[in-house]
């Protein structure tokens, strides 16, 4: 028990030291959050992917929860997680394994074809004579016959084959790590699906924003993540499938190069043309003019038009980010975050945009007052203005 004189000073000391108490509490909170970020840093990607997948499969979970009943949330979350694991994770694992195997075979076959092709004879064909003459006339410094095109293409194919082998070796060598990440993802996804509403409610309680502002931020991030998934990966799947069909028709291994075309569709501006255009040119150079023209038409009309028709249907009433900002966010995200930058870039930029909108609304009176009086330029009199003056 404190002496009476010391007890008399306690209320007064607490009242006078309230700012110090707040600063001390905030410093401890910041230190705890920094330590928590250090601990959770290895699982940041898994947490973000889990949040996006939980939001994407929320309608599915609602239907399963309706069938299981309101008193069985654990069973509904478990069934939803199992459905995601069965329909997405397991097929994706086998897909990547088959893709690596087909990639090595396709690159080896391409190397044999390049080694057996005489490019000097190809450039000497009568059908290419007008084009060769045009190149020599307008680009005299470029001698196609002296270019080491065959050696360069073989080196590129060898480099691509080595990259595939290295990727396959890393995947096989990290089977345990991949398995652990998948299990952690399923664990995180289960709790996000079951307890996501409570977690979000607690987070919203701690954030000192209005309910409308919180709803707009959540809605913007949800729309951006869904638009990236639906607008990018679904279109990549459709374009890869269409490209594989076209490659199968012209007699080229469809699975690997069709998948490469799907991955290339994620590249802005260039897109799938980075695959089907060289294939068309190769078919033309090897004398298969009909198939080369067919592949070029198929790529320009069928494959490229998928993006124009499907994207508006998938992204209607979604994020209002323009194509300009989406392009920059994807490129910057890939450069900074790697492959996951396809998702992280638009999320970061979408969050910045909605925060700028909230700032403009909260400080509208300051901004309008600052820009209320616009600077006026003095009117310069002309002879016509002074002609009628007394």
Image: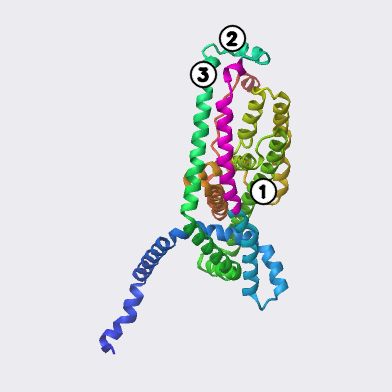
Q: Is residue 65 above or below residue 250?
A: below
* Residue 308 locus on image (x, y percent): 71, 40
Callout 2: SS = helix
Judged by depth in the image, the label closer to the viewer, 3 or 2, is 3
**Magenta span: chief secondary structure:** helix
Q: Give the label on residue 234, or none.
A: 1
Q: Are marks 3 and 1 in contact (CB under 8 Å)?
A: no
Residue 390 in sight from this viewpoint: no
Q: Which residue is mark 2?
A: 137
Callout 1 crowding tier (Cα within 10 Å): few <14, some 14–19, many ≥20 = some
Per the image, the residue denoted by label 3 is 147
Q: Is residue 14 visible?
A: yes
| Residue displayed at 70% across by 29% down | 296
Residue beneath the point at 67% across and 45% down: 235
Left or right: 151, with 296 as reference point: left
Residue 356 image position (x, y, % from top left) = 54, 50
Say which mark, if any, is on residue 246: none
Label 1: state its secondary structure. helix
Decide which of tag 1 and tag 2 comes sooner along the chain. Answer: 2
Q: Quadrant of residue 89?
A: bottom right
């Amino acid at each position: 028990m404190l002496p009476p004189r010391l007890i008399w000073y306690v209320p007064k000391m607490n009242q006078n030291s309230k700012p110090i108490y707040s600063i001390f509490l905030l410093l401890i909170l910041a230190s705890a959050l920094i330590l928590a970020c250090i601990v959770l840093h290895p699982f940041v990607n898994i947490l973000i992917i889990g949040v996006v997948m939980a939001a994407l499969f929320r309608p599915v979970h609602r239907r399963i929860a309706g069938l299981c009943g309101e008193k069985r949330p654990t069973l509904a979350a478990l069934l939803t997680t199992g459905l995601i694991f069965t329909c997405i994770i397991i097929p994706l694992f086998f897909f990547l394994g088959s893709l690596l195997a087909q990639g090595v075979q396709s690159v080896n076959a391409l190397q044999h074809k390049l080694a057996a092709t005489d490019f000097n004879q190809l450039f000497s064909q009568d059908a290419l004579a007008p084009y060769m003459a045009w190149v020599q006339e307008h680009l005299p410094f470029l001698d196609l016959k002296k270019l080491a095109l065959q050696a360069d293409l073989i080196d590129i194919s060898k480099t691509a084959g080595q990259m595939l082998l290295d990727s396959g070796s890393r995947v096989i060598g990290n089977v345990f790590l991949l398995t652990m990440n998948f299990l952690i993802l399923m664990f995180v996804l289960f709790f996000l699906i079951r307890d996501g509403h409570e977690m979000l409610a607690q987070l919203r309680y701690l954030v000192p924003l209005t309910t409308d502002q919180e709803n707009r931020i959540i809605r913007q991030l949800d729309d951006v993540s869904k638009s990236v998934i639906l607008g990018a990966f679904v279109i990549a799947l459709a374009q890869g499938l269409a490209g594989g069909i076209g490659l199968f028709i012209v007699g080229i291994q469809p699975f690997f190069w069709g998948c490469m075309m799907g991955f290339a569709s994620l590249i802005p501006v260039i897109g799938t043309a980075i695959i089907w255009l060289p294939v068309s040119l190769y078919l033309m150079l090897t004398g298969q003019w009909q198939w080369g023209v067919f592949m070029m038409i198929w790529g320009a009309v069928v494959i490229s038009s998928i993006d124009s028709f499907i994207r508006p249907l998938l992204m209607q009433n979604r994020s209002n980010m323009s194509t300009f900002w989406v392009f920059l966010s994807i490129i910057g995200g890939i450069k900074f975050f790697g492959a996951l930058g396809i998702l992280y870039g638009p999320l970061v930029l979408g969050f910045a945009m909605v925060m700028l909108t909230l700032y403009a609304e909260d400080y509208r009176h300051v901004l309008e007052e600052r820009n209320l009086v616009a600077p006026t330029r003095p009117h310069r009199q002309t002879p016509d203005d002074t002609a009628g003056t007394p």
